[in-house]
Image (spheres, rainbow, N blue to C red):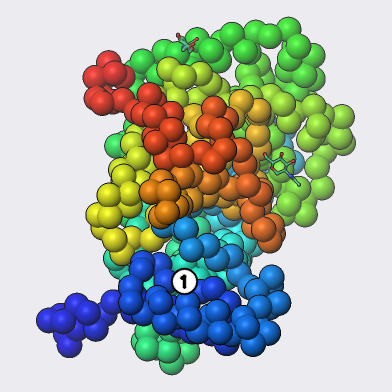
Amino acid sequence: MEYDNNENTWRRSSSPKIQGSSCSSLPHRPTTTAVIVLGLAVLSCLMGYCVLSETLPYESKTLRLVVIFFRHGARTPVSSYKSDPYKNYQWPNGLGSLTNTGKLQMYELGSKYRSYYANFIPEEYHDKDVYIRSSDKSRCMMSAYTFLAGLYPPTERQMWHPELAWQPIPVHSLPREIDNIVAGTKSCKLWKRMYDEILAEKDSDPKFVELFDYLSKHTNQSLRSVVDVDYLYSTLQTEQEAGLKLPEWTRNVFPNKMREPFMLSLALMSYNESMHRFKAGPLLGDLRQNLQEAVNHINMDRALYIYSGHDVNIVAFMRALGFTQLMEPEYGASVVVELHEEVEQDTFYIKLFYRNNTKVEVPMELKIPRCEEPCTYKRFEHLIETLIPTDWEAECQN
Ligand SMILES: *[C@@H]1O[C@H](CO)[C@@H](O)[C@H](O)[C@H]1NC(C)=O
Ligand SMILES: *[C@@H]1O[C@H](CO)[C@@H](O)[C@H](O)[C@H]1NC(C)=O
Ligand SMILES: *[C@@H]1O[C@H](CO)[C@@H](O)[C@H](O)[C@H]1NC(C)=O
């Protein structure tokens, strides 16, 4: 109760802590203190501490907003197949659930982002700084919670239990029937029509006939679609990860020959521009609003948005941004959009990063197709604008 009347006691200080080894810790938002901090930083540089900066976590005085979209951590299989020797295997917590390995992956990913953005994301969790949305699937919710445990371990003041270095942080989600933002599971008639059409076309590609025949024979079930290959691929993958010995016949096709149809199946959900509007449009709309608010200095405390979803959602997002290559996002793969402000030139620009998995130390910067570098916010906004439906329902012909 003591904090209720005076919000300021809650808020993070607007200037960062001064660390001896830090050379250019600039505050998130300019204040008078900034000048002092900068002064001290310059001073410490002069005193020879500057060399240390190479090993310091990421810092950029131009950074204004970070948006992270990740795939959940390692999970148990979602389905099995007819001849599966592990059909009756007792998976801990059942099918499609986040494993302990998965929890650890996401926790570590959260810790990595904590140190990577140490100079940008306040150490102390505050509700105003961050907003987290998740797919309603348990494994995604749990991934979000474990990620946050790594990102925001409680500071001393925030410890509420002597033995539990964890604090509750809200994760928002919509039921799958109405989620067209994170999981993209809300039904859309026109999209479904397009998807069925493009799927039928790809499934009848002669190049897959031999593989379909082989898999049908060995799984003892009719397997004639890249979607079937997709399910089988991830089942074999999770069984293998669990240390189970796969049947001999899989050697000829898994993972290599199955990989392309698997990736194609992920991509088909958001195959072309019309489909981007339905599968990525609402997420891009969310992104546009977040960026706009930051650019217009609304909601100034908000530094971070986090989305916890599935492989297909990462693929849909990347395809909508213009990446056409087929991809296989691993567990905990993450895409980051950064908004930067070049104060002197009075311009904002966008940077895009990808971490293939939770082991990657430094994210890889990606060049955004159709946005020449530096990719200005204006140009980026224009790019995504064309993919955001004004009335999603109506466009879906629901
Ligand atoms: C394949 O399915 C048939 C019919 O369900 C069954 O009789 C047969 O035992 C199965 N073979 C294998 C290898 O699972
Ligand atoms: C996308 O694919 C669907 C299904 O084949 C098709 O109906 C639609 O016209 C395509 N859109 C574009 C922009 O190519
Ligand atoms: C990481 O992902 C990128 C983009 O999908 C890909 O080009 C690269 O080969 C991947 N690296 C590894 C080690 O998988």
> For residue 229, what is the image quadrant?
top right
Mark 1 sits on what residue?
Answer: 26
- Determine whether the beta carbon of the residue marked 1 sits less than 8 angstroms from the nearest atom of ligand 3: no
> For residue 219, what is the image quadrant?
top right
> For residue 305, what is the image quadrant?
bottom left
Task: Tell me the crowding category of disc 1: few under 14, some 14 to 19, or many 20 or more residues within 10 angstroms, Cα based.
Answer: many
Where is residue 167 drawn, in percent x and y?
40, 76
Image quarter in which the N terminus is found: bottom left
Count of residue discs? 1
The residue under the point 55% across, 15% down is 199
**Does residue 178 appear to the left or right of 143 in the view shown?**
left
Residue 364 appears in view: yes
Where is residue 140 drawn, in percent x and y?
47, 52
The residue under the point 19% across, 83% down is 3
Q: Is residue 258 above or below residue 91?
A: above
**Does residue 116 appear to the left or right of 15 in the view shown?**
right
**Does residue 171 appear to the left or right of 209 in the view shown?**
left
Where is residue 113 drawn, in percent x and y?
55, 64
The residue under the point 29% across, 37% down is 178
The residue under the point 66% across, 37% down is 328
Q: Is residue 348 above or below residue 196?
A: below
**Of 119 and 142, which appears nearest the observer?**
119
**Of 109 and 194, which appears nearest the observer?**
109
**Residue type at numbered disc 1:** Leu
Image quarter in which the C terminus is found: top left
- Residue that sits furthest to the bottom in the current view: 162
